[in-house]
Image: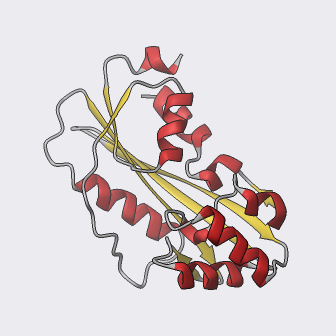
Amino acid sequence: MLKEKLKNYNIILASKSPRRQQFFKDLNIDFTIKLKEVEELYPQQLKGIEITDYLANLKAKAYKNLKDNDLLITSDTIVWLENKALGKPKNYHEAFVMLKNLSGKKHEVITSISIKNKNFQKIINDITTVFFKKISDKEINYYINNYKPFDKAGAYGIQEWIGFIAIDKIEGSYFNVVGLPVHKLYKELMNL
């Protein structure tokens, strides 16, 4: 269905996330991956969804000469905990601190997606609330050592071991926590 709808577009996914790439494959979308290095800095006064909207747009701006039939998709995800954005941890220590801070608390996973071609741009977003149970230092160390979550916002992947043992419940889209609110992206693409 979606493949037929998008047949006249050259879909460009600007993401090195294997999870996002897999979602596109699972949606049966023909796409190419084009990556540009973008320094993911944002104005400090931005909060929550403003951050991910800003970064998804910043990534989209890096692609200057889109052709008429190009459709560029960029995205950004953060974990929002106690009025602070948690991005990807740079090292073991940062990952440990992030997971320690998430332990026993609820947080939001916020994702924004930019859909852009030569003539228009639309940014959509989604928020999922995730409730973590208390996790021990031993469990945190085990997870980091075995799963190396350095490419994940908030230092965890819900689809991995930590998700099985530490997440009490979620409110909203599971797939948003994995990395993309697929249901919202599908709806937008079907409405092109």
Q: Residue furthest left?
A: 65
Quadrant (top left, top right, bottom left, bottom right) of the C terminus: top left
Rendered residue at 81%/57% (across/down): 164
135 above or below 69? below
Q: Position of residue 165 (x, y in %)?
A: 83, 63
Q: Position of residue 183 (x, y in %)?
A: 61, 38
Q: Is residue 100 left or right of residue 58?
A: right
Rendered residue at 53%/57% (across/down): 111
Which of 85 and 101 lies nearest the eye of the viewer?
101
Q: How many badges with numbers are in the image?
A: 0
84 above or below 142? below
Quadrant (top left, top right, bottom left, bottom right) of the N terminus: top right
Q: Position of residue 61 (x, y in %)?
A: 24, 55
- Can residue 185 be seen in this snapshot? yes
- Can residue 168 be seen in this snapshot? no
Q: Is residue 57 left or right of residue 37?
A: right
Which of 88 and 61 lies nearest the eye of the viewer?
88
Which of 42 and 151 lies nearest the eye of the viewer?
151
Which of 163 and 62 lies nearest the eye of the viewer?
163
The colour scheme used here is secondary structure
Rendered residue at 46%/69% (across/down): 50
Rendered residue at 47%/40% (across/down): 21
Quarter of the rendering containing residue 155: bottom right
